[in-house]
Amino acid sequence: MPMAKGSFSIAGGGLSGLSAAITLARAGRKVSVYEKGAACGARRQGDIEGLETWIFNDDPLSYMAAAGLPTQFAHLPQHSFNYVAPDGGLHTAEEGRPFFYLVRRGAEETSIDQAFYRQAVELGVRFHFREAKKPGEVDLFAGGPKAANAYAHGITFRTTAPDGVYLLLGREAAPSGYAYGIVWNGQGTLAAAFRRSSDGADWTLERLVERFSKVLGGPLSEKAEFAAYGHYAPKPTLFSGQTLLAGEAAGWQDALFGFGMNFAIRSGVIAARSLLDQDNYAALCKVELTGRLAASWVNRSIYERLSDRAMAKLAHKLIERGAVWSTLHAAAQPSFIKGLMARLAA
Ligand SMILES: Cc1cc2nc3c(=O)[nH]c(=O)nc-3n(C[C@H](O)[C@H](O)[C@H](O)COP(=O)(O)OP(=O)(O)OC[C@H]3O[C@@H](n4cnc5c(N)ncnc54)[C@H](O)[C@@H]3O)c2cc1C
């Protein structure tokens, strides 16, 4: 049963649960976080991820600072990325504002997960590791993907190549999805993201690694394979009985490219504010999140219908015009039509 007013319980010590815990603790509430893993971030494999800057109207680090969340974790702004075309050609997109901030995921000290955990501890949040809770047993359930309908398969590795982000499009890289490579301080992540597990039937990780090694111009060492899944939905599920859901447990994740950190953090903060002020959670989510989720769902449907040729043509045009960020930003914004289309798909 949910705890008495004045104290709150949360299941899940990922970014959504921790953002909620910090927000509640800052408001003077007692908070208990139940995390089924041995540490915050332990679900992740030490991979490098990108905190994108285009879906919302404010920079993610400014948002986090204003919301009282930590920003003192290792991060690297990326003003450029390399697009690897289906024919293997390399094209660099470079613009004035960062496309994303690279961050480390996992249980190691410099990860974003551990920075959030440390701040929560400083604010007095009590952690119960290796303890799983069901939605009905807590005030907020933030247990991550409730089902698997998106898959990532890749490696972490070491390299002598310089820092950089690579986007690999086309059926060879990832059928009906995309692949990405990130190099930061000699460490790297390479992964393909699929929409359905069956999409990867004739795809092999070995071929992707070989292709990417050619792009980097050298072999990848200390390779460690990982596989993960996520959950997308055109419409969020905000409640399980009386319990609020946040992060991927609610279906918050950009369906176009699988960016979920921003959604997780913001949904955690919004959920905490609705618990504090007894506000209508759905109404608060609608302002910032729901329309963007719908837009991403529609964008993904359009993306999956593009041929490799059309995708390459579009990417070249946007890179040449220096219009990648502005196009992504415009496409991510809510609109009546996109909302309607997503509602029909739900
Ligand atoms: C391989 C991969 C690459 C990605 N790359 C990016 C990227 O580059 N940029 C980006 O923005 N997003 C990316 N994402 C998505 C992003 O990481 C997630 O959307 C986001 O971290 C979700 O946060 P969350 O708090 O909702 O869930 P999670 O991070 O999954 O946290 C949920 C936590 O709850 C715990 N838990 C689960 N069930 C229970 C229970 N019953 N009781 C108690 N605890 C429980 C889990 O152990 C876990 O620690 C990626 C995801 C994957 C898998």
Image (cartoon, helix red, strand yellow):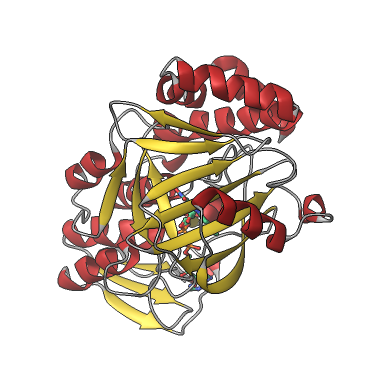
300 over 142 or under it: above or below: above
Q: Is residue 124 left or right of residue 291?
A: left
Would you say 214 lies left or right of 100 here? Answer: right
Name the spot of residue 326 as percent of width and height, x first.
41, 20
Q: Quadrant of the C terminus?
A: top right
* Residue 283, percent from left and from top: 43, 34
**Residue at x 37%, y 74% (from the top left corner):** 107
Q: Can you tell which quarter of the image residue 321 is in? A: top left
The answer to whether one can see residue 116 in this image is yes
Residue 270: quarter of image: top left
Q: Identify the residue at image location x=41%, y=55%.
A: 183
Closer to the camera, 277 or 198?
Answer: 198
Q: Is residue 152 visible?
A: no
The one nearer the camera, 3 or 72, is: 72
Side (left or right) of 270 relative to 243: left
Residue at left 60%, top 20%? 314
Considering depth in this image, is 117 or 190 the residue closer to the camera? 190
Q: Answer above or below: position of 128 versus 167.
A: below
Q: Residue furthest front?
A: 217
Q: In the image, residue 337 lies at what x, y percent?
A: 61, 16
Count of numbered marks = 0
Tell whether 11 sits left or right of 64: right
Vertical placement of residue 278 versus 230, above or below: above
Place of residue 263 in the rendered image (x, y in percent of width and height, measured from the top left): 43, 45
